[in-house]
Amino acid sequence: MIQRLAKNRDEAWPWLSAASVALSLLMLAALMSLLVVRGLGHFWPAPIEEVTLADGQVIAGHAVREAPLPDRPGHERLYYTANRDLDGALWQWVALDAIQTRSTPADLVLLDRASWGDFVGRLVAVVTPNERLEGEAAWQALQQHLNQRNAVANGAPSSAASGDSHVPGDTYLPGDTYLIVESVEGRRRQQPLHDIHRAQRPNAMSMGENIQTWGGAVWRFLSQGPRAANTGGGVWPAIFGTVLMVLLMSLLVTPFGVLAAIYLNEIAHQGRLTRLVRIGVRNLAGVPSIVYGVFGLGVFVYGIGGSLDEWFFSDTLPSPTFGTGGLLWASLTLALLTLPVVIVATEEGLARIPDAQREGALALGATRLEMLTRIVLPMAAPAMLTGVILAVARAAGEVAPLMLVGVAKLAPQMPLDGEFPYLHLERKFMHLGYHIFDTAFHGEDVQAALPLVYATALLLVLIVLVLNLTAIFLRHHLRRERGN
Amino acid sequence: MTPSPDTLNQRLRLARDRLATGLITAGGIGVLLAVLAIAVFLLWETLPLLRLGDTLALAKLTPLAWGTLKAAFYALLFAVPLALGAAMYSALFMSTRLRHRLKPTLEMMEAIPGVVVGFIAGLIIAPWVERHLAGTLLLVIGLPLSALLVGVAWHHLGTRLQRTLPLSWAGLWLVPWFVLMIVLIFWVTPQLEQYLPEGDLRRFLDKQWGIDYATRNAMIVGVAMGFAVIPSIYALAEDALADVPKSLLEGAQALGATRWQALWKVALPTAGPGLFSAVMIGAGRAVGETMIVLMASGNTALFSASPFEGMRSISAAIAIELPEAAPDSLTYHLLILAALALFVFTFLVNTLAEAVRQRLRRRYRRLEGHP
């Protein structure tokens, strides 16, 4: 009996341990697919539903999600109805049992406007000073006009010119043209043409147009600045700030990290002290990043930055120049944070090189410098590269210390521009990770910002994963090479 | 007599060598000193607190310390069983091919930035769990039970099915099974919940036992931070288990032990210190993690051990309050004291783990017959 029990237990435990692997993988897969589906799906042109409710009300919008009703059984659905200028809100909850009919009429348009956000409804007419186009003709004229305007704005005059030669001149509409648009319940509004970025009829689009629209939306997300309090537009300044900061950091951390590793491994006397220092450096990789942020704030920003302000920028003094968070201080802080990563990786590479190589070089009459630069460093180069890539990957995902030393929710000026001295080390910058935190937790309309936060999170994860994969691949390659 | 060009050249080379060695030494020591400067700076900036001698101010730190430990505790409660289980499975039962794929995959998991995990946990999972509390709690029992069920059923399967679904690949083919179970559990629980007097577990907890439920709570933080900590615990624990000398395990099995008995009675005690240091490293990470706690806990400084209530950790308090604190104010020095505490704690924990690991490595070498 006891033996059988023991045997059963022995058969049970392996399954529990297998379950923990499966659960970890499941969580990872769930997180990644959530990010991919929500992050990329947001840009897909979703159909617009026209919904008639039991009380006669008509609404139109994208269905977003469903939730149980708070007070009675059943579910309700959230619609993105846009039209903030008409309804005063972007969203509307509708109880499922109140819905009488649902349809997706092909003539519903979605206008992306500079003010008041999106508009959902029907296009009634395009009115120029000379004429009034209605129905399909109005939609055609609007489409052609927007295409040409975008082509001109993108600096592609050839396509605009060829477009001009094929279509009559009246498609390039005069500046004071306005549209008459009508919401689904019949309220009309005059909409100036210059206020419109894009117009779509999501319900009438073919698969090819859908993909094209999706690609365009993804591209705009990557290449434009944020709009409407970070709930619209793109993340280009954040990408730029992240990359610039990480580049500066790797410029700082690589020479110093390699120098320290060479000193520890090749020059220092290999005694008790060196071993202690080595353990200390290794453990610094485990010190929380926020502690480095505190150090950066206290020493770089208040200490060095404050002194720099007193010496060189005293004329602007109550408002600080270097005495506040900025690009330089953020890069320096992260360089310090990633220093142990580079040191440890480089040291591993150096330790793998057999002593015979060094002794051989010295025996042939090389000095230590020559031995280092011609034999040891070239052999350790992949390890150093691995270390730097790992450091970059860690720095790109780190947000906590940046909150103390120079990240901004919205930086009015890019840290790199055409104005002397071109690279403005004292400016604050935007960062992808902080953009996620700030938009998700301090935004005014979280529901509206959520899809963009997903997309930003996906972008950040992709950047970090690609960097890490490169490092893993390099290390693997390196080990195989040494193994042979 | 003028020196020949050769000796001149030689001297130049030697001088250059000496110069470079000097520069490297200076640079290396400089970098190491800069790293040391962190500790010195933190100590120096906490000194003014002694002069102020305000013991009341220190009381402000105790809820923060409590919050930090609470968050780390729940994170480890979630992460340690999963990570150690995964390590045991992959060191002893898993097929080699899967193992070579699994390690980099979990390394990827470690690389996912905390801000992304925090966002998902705080904004997506927390409200969802609030609506499906009963189902989530049932998962804790349901998933392990369903794995056991699979184990029992597996032994009654035919040999052919056993060969297509081997235990060595169970880590992979259990995933779709779990998806099925999760869907099932969340489909069943609302029906079960109706039999509660309040029709909803959250209201039931509140009415019956007066348990508050905050949307962003320690349970959410524990799962999110556990997710972030699992890979580092797993990697170290797996290393320790995989390095156990094969001869020990083979000896145990030759004496009639099952594979699990060999693991439980031989491998675990031998690798015990390694597992301990893995958990320590995990604890160090959990204590210092900032963004996940900041985003997934309510950031309210409470003294409560309940998994359904929030907390405010030291790291989150630093991230929120330090940018606003004027330099030389009491808050500023207090927060730096908090940072010093974090620094000392993680440094000590990591050093302890490292020392234990070094000793373990020596023991393995002795066991394998190399003194």
Image: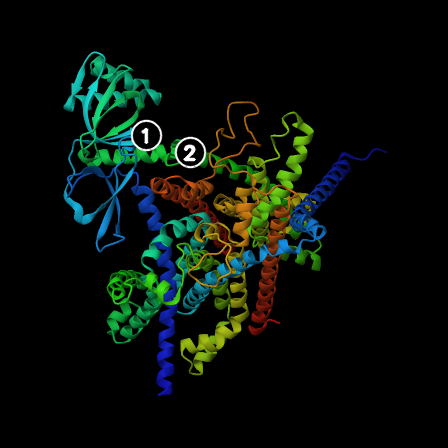
User: How many numbered marks have been drawn onto this rendered protein structure?
Assistant: 2
**Where does label 1 land, which residue?**
A116
Horizontally, residue A89 falls left or right of residue B243, namely left
Pointer 2: residues within 10 angstroms few (<14), some, or many (20+)?
some
Which mark sits nearer the N-terminus, 2 or 1? 1
Quick one: SS at disc 2?
helix
User: Is A165 placed left or right of B116 in the picture?
Assistant: left
Q: CA distance from mark 2 to mark 1?
A: 22 Å
Q: Is residue A397 shown to the viewer in this render?
A: yes
Q: Residues within 10 Å of mark 1 (few under 14, many from 20)?
A: some
The image position of residue A75, as x and y in percent, is 23, 52
Residue named by callout 2: A236
Protein chain holding label 1: A
The kind of residue on which mark 1 rests is Trp
Give the farthest residue toward the bottom.
A1
Whether marks 2 and 1 lie on the same chain: yes
- Identify the subunit bearing mark 2: A
**Amino acid carrying mark 2 in the image:** Trp
x%, y% of residue B186? 28, 61
**Residue B276 placement (x, y as % from top left):** 53, 67
**Picture layout, residue B31 above or below residue B134:** above
Mark toward the viewer: 2 or 1 = 1
Screen quadrant of the N terminus of chain A: bottom left
Q: Quadrant of residue B152?
A: bottom left
Which residue sits at x=25%, y=70%? B161
Residue appearing at x 57%, y 25% in the figure: A421
Dividing the picture into quadrants, the one containing residue B160 is bottom left
Q: Is disc 1 placed on a helix, strand or loop?
A: loop
